Image (tube, coloured by chain):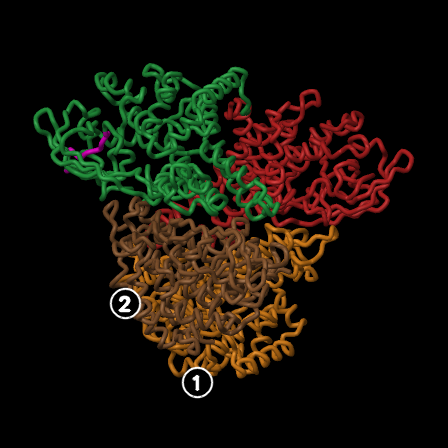
Chain colours: A orange, B green, C red, D brown
Amino acid sequence: MHAKFSPEELAFQEEVRGFMRDNFTPDLAARIHHPKTFRDASVEWQKLLDGKGWAANGWPVEHGGTGWSATQKYIYTTELAAAGAPDVVPMGIKMVAPVLYSYGSEEQKARFLPITKSSDIWWCQGYSEPGAGSDLAALQTRAVRDGDDYIIDGTKIWTTFAQYADWIFCLVRTDNTGKPQQGISFLLIDMKSPGITVSPIISVDDEHHLNEVNFENVRVPVANRIGDENEGWTYAKALLTYERTALSGVGYCKRKLTHIRQLASQVSASGSRLIDDSDFRGRLADVEMEVMALEFLELRVLSAIDSGGAPGMESSLLKLKGTEMQQAVQSLQWDVAAGFGGISPDADDELWESDGNKARREYMFGRACTIFGGSNEVQRNIIAKFALGLQAR
Amino acid sequence: MHAKFSPEELAFQEEVRGFMRDNFTPDLAARIHHPKTFRDASVEWQKLLDGKGWAANGWPVEHGGTGWSATQKYIYTTELAAAGAPDVVPMGIKMVAPVLYSYGSEEQKARFLPITKSSDIWWCQGYSEPGAGSDLAALQTRAVRDGDDYIIDGTKIWTTFAQYADWIFCLVRTDNTGKPQQGISFLLIDMKSPGITVSPIISVDDEHHLNEVNFENVRVPVANRIGDENEGWTYAKALLTYERTALSGVGYCKRKLTHIRQLASQVSASGSRLIDDSDFRGRLADVEMEVMALEFLELRVLSAIDSGGAPGMESSLLKLKGTEMQQAVQSLQWDVAAGFGGISPDADDELWESDGNKARREYMFGRACTIFGGSNEVQRNIIAKFALGLQAR
Amino acid sequence: MDFSLTEEQVMLKDSVAKFLADNYAPEQREAIVKNEAGYSAEHWATFSELGWLTIPFSEADGGFGGNVADVSAVMEEFGQVLVVEPYWSSIVLAGQLIARSTNDDLKSRAMPTVISGEAQYSFAWLEAQSSFSLSHVSTTASKKGDSYHLSGEKKLVLNAKASHFIVAARSSGDVNSESGISLFVVDATNPALKIETVRLMDGQHACNIQFTDLVIDQADMLTQEGDAYPLIAEVVDEALVALCAEAVGAMTYLYKATAEYANTRKQFGVTIGSFQALQHRMVDMFMATEQCRSLLVRAQCAILDGSEERSQDVAVLKAMVGKYGRKIAEEAVQLHGGMGVTNEMPIGHYLKRLMMIDMYFGGSDIHRRRFSDMRYL
Amino acid sequence: MDFSLTEEQVMLKDSVAKFLADNYAPEQREAIVKNEAGYSAEHWATFSELGWLTIPFSEADGGFGGNVADVSAVMEEFGQVLVVEPYWSSIVLAGQLIARSTNDDLKSRAMPTVISGEAQYSFAWLEAQSSFSLSHVSTTASKKGDSYHLSGEKKLVLNAKASHFIVAARSSGDVNSESGISLFVVDATNPALKIETVRLMDGQHACNIQFTDLVIDQADMLTQEGDAYPLIAEVVDEALVALCAEAVGAMTYLYKATAEYANTRKQFGVTIGSFQALQHRMVDMFMATEQCRSLLVRAQCAILDGSEERSQDVAVLKAMVGKYGRKIAEEAVQLHGGMGVTNEMPIGHYLKRLMMIDMYFGGSDIHRRRFSDMRYL
């Protein structure tokens, strides 16, 4: 039982640190955090990581993964967060890719995996529908076979960054008989296909992350289907597990907590520091203690995966506690920084990265993390069933 | 909108205070709080209150009630609590009596109400069964008609103070067809009847409050049935509502908070006071603020009843929040007083009323208040249905 | 003891509710917020016509003679739909500073324009470092002849389009002293003012004001020099009760709207409102609202009864409304799922408003501390 | 980085679990607790036979050479069934004080008797006013010739039947100073001791000890005069990890037992475990247990890695175990309904034990403060 790094691991840590220092420049940081420049800067950042061989670190080695141990993954994530650098935009590398390399045909792998890794394709996820949120299997977007094509009709909602996307990976209904989980297929669709309309949804942070994507008579080659027809749910479930593991956000929480400690340690004009205020100190400690636990919960899960376990119920646990802690951290950040800058959604470019504005938009958009990617209520149901053996009604 | 007392109300307050001062003596207080002397002291106390005409203050005036306004009831309860005096033992005055005067025959009223008021009969409640807790209507104790008698067989559980009781009021099953709520009758049973066995249940405070009551071929005159056969559920529901209104415990919480403030204000040998500790202060304030709200929630309900409303869903709200606050107060009391005296269940008579022992046994037995009298989970279901219109599945 | 609304209050509430039902649907509100001033001048005129602007003022001053309970009854209705017109800042807060001014000349000049709605005063008190302490005033006022020279900076002044500001400034005492604070009426068009408008996330337009050597005539001072603190403390206490009434209205909307949504939204073949875990959370929302409503009644009674504990009761109310308002709104967003995090649904706007209400005059922690400092000596 | 148990640890855990499964069912435990000493001398002898008492001691000292992870593995099993034998007080706490003593003579005299289980030492440190601060020692030790005269009072000393006490006393420095504290081994039969036995609500038998002019030979001092604090702090940190391992075992029992009960108990025609609101609460119990287990791993690693943050990690562990231990046990009682509040069901005993664990060496608040004082400078 030990958490110490070996000399090799320490060397790796130095390597990551050096890479971040050299590549994640303040200029890139500013651009990646601003909505106007976000897309291009994200592509640039992923290309830098890919140049180093790290963009797709979680993939199997044969597809360009790194084969890192759990410890190395942890070191990488920690150093990324410490540098304030975001992880890669997840839809490609973390969401569709595992489905591609697990269930895709050789042609599909050859066509999509390299450009996904190099960020030459921007993916979005066509998953939820207006009538299918937590109850994802209720989805109704139809795919009707017509020769070598499917004809798609329906609506996807909450589609993050669809406005930038080249391709969308979609769950569609190819069969209406049987249980809802049956009859779902997994399709890759070119966003330039005629009949696709993307409408923005402005979220409570007053920003445009989310979209509604409409399909009207959209023609998609059957060759763009992953795996077998009507088996999409199986692939999707696997994908969901990967998505959740990516969602614990310990690195984010730790970086934010460092930031909050710094802000709270500033001496005010009256000579006092918020961090010396006993109420604030207590609340900060409560959150820090939970994050310290979460960090080792994640390490325990990573370590178990390393020893051959597959992410299952534990990923629900990480998603659940992780998102709760992200929100707790965002509330603290609001309380520290909102004061006089975070209350306006009109921040100009200069104010965009101000502590106050960051506090506002992260708190606001942070409300979504317990809803999307499988709501926390659904995660609790999953844990009740699989960890506690409790019967549903 | 005002909460001020009128001159008449202020005079009444003085009268109650004077009565408490003169009658709830330290000697009586000591005896009523000790298990060995509890029964006799409780009878003595109720007789003193009855002598003043206050024992059955909530009853209709024609049966010996006081006809007090909501304000007077509030003043009475507040002063009772301020004096550290317990309210009357509820099973007679507050639980069975409302059923008696609402649904009992003239003979039953004449026979039982006066001795209930004067505490010449000790009642206990035969309600829950091993298989019927929150799901009370599942009760199975059978009452089979045999001439002018019923023959009772079955088991009642969690029967508070059955060891002292002269009579028990019981829900029994007189019909097994139809819905569980149908076929239940309300009986009054002499505890001296042959075939009744009372077995103690020691609760987590290491004391004997609770019992199991067994009925084996117990013969009960049909004349001891309240109202109609198979209609007992209707009467029981009304009783439950009264029971819950009696359970908010604001007075108890306020008295305890005063006690906790006093304990926490003692200067320790090192010159510090717990009440100056910011963490403790914050937690104390959190509880006090909730109790301040609860106090006015209760006043609002009382005031609405005064204006002709009947206690319904509000009594669930008071029971729910009230018991939560009682436990919160008990936790605080434990944290303040447990130190070196409350940790032992072996307190001798001298230590019985010590702050530490009080903290231990009140915390421990206090776990029961969110379970009995309709568990808090059931109260939440009731509120969801009646206040929020949410459908059950 | 009497907690019921008077017949007049019931009528008033009904008339407010009726107007808002016709004029303040979510789409209508969205259009209102987009106005340049951040509110509808037309509605403001209607408020005036309907007599709502007169409510808290005495009959002698030309008002309706209402009290904190009347104002709260109106504000609770406002909270149900998130009214953005500057009623609270102009009538409840600044209006009362004027109505209780000891400067009779000033009062008789200003009062009629406040009551008619023609003028909108706004109280400029907060400073960057004040941590919401009412007695923290670093803005200076130096007397020169018959006038005062004011220098300083005020933050988060509500209603950027106010016609006048009531500026708290200090002529003596140290920066946290309760004595030495005066209130000056400043015309918003005074060229010495540097006004920067800030749109707040709850839809309100506030401003930051800077001024150096702003010259104000002695006649425009609301009390005797240095004597304003008790007036400020009294008026703010009452205004916070009205603000909390608005919050209770918003909380009421939220738990009801959430229950309604849960009763219609289906997932897994049943309404989500039939899931017991969600039911129990909605019960918690309801219970928290009722706890806050009870404290609202308590604080109103304390003020109307002239209780010595009024400041304690107000602090507790503000602390609990701040805490539970945010909590309830967060839960409402969560239970609305994806719809909750869009600007298209009203739910998120209630969250923003309740977060701002928590912030005004200090958040939950600050008022809990205020309470415990008064209570635990 | 490696969090898995070694093969030896797995075998050890299994052998402990097997013994307890055969000998520590709730009825068996009830009989054990009724023993005069509060535990079973027979079991203690078996612990010795099975080699459990040797675990944390080095091979050079005749032990098994185990570390905090090995001890924790045993303690976690103990927590599952609430073992009452004085393993923690005698082996983990007092045993380590002796094992790390710089007084080699004393150590070589005492060590074999500790390891064999023949002697039971207990650490007497807490005083009425110490508020669980380790450096607060007001018991005095005055040197006279080759011996020390001790006067003072110790509270809540575990294992009333201990054969020896290790008494913390001060020969210099003020009452809260870290320097000036020494540790003295006192024979429990010393007639100068006034011992009052207190049965604790968790079933343990503790005692309060008073003494005036208790004469102890210099040879019975564990470290150099006044030097004991670092030893105490180090040993207590490790011992708290083991104690928290016991708590995690108890918490694990509770969430599992509650889920099992909920899956069998029927109300309204269905198992209560099928009610979603209860399911979600049980998930919270499970999640809190996993959080605490993660902190247990974290603290073990910190100690084994010799991390500078070991005291922080231990403080966090103790704070969270204290808070969640009580919370989980309260929930377990609630979800067991009436059965939960009787002494007949084991659930209530877990609540009592977890409340006492929270109290030992300071409760949740105290350790949260300890953490924040170390972290927020």
Residue B380 or residue C105, whichever sits in front: B380
In the image, is residue B36 above or below residue C334? above
Would you name the residue on which mark 1 appears?
A: A62
Residue C301, above or below A185: above
Q: Amino acid at mark 2?
A: Lys
Residue nearest the viewer, comparing B300 with D322:
D322
Q: Is residue B142 above or below residue A49?
A: above
Q: Residue at horizontal 21%, vertical 27%?
A: B188
A213, A234: nearer the viewer:
A234
Residue at x 35% of width, y 75% of height = A227
* Amino acid on which the number 1 mark rests in the picture: Glu
State the CA–CA distance, disc 1 to disc 2: 46 Å
Bin the neighbour count of mark 2 within 10 Å (Cα to Cα): few under 14, some 14-19, many 20 and up: few
Q: Position of residue D110 (x, y in %)?
A: 43, 69
Q: Quadrant of the N terminus of chain B?
A: top right
Residue located beneath label 2 in the image: D18
Name the residue at the bottom extreme: A62
Magenta part of the chain: B168-176
Point out the residue furthest to the left here.
B147
Which secondary structure, mark 1? helix
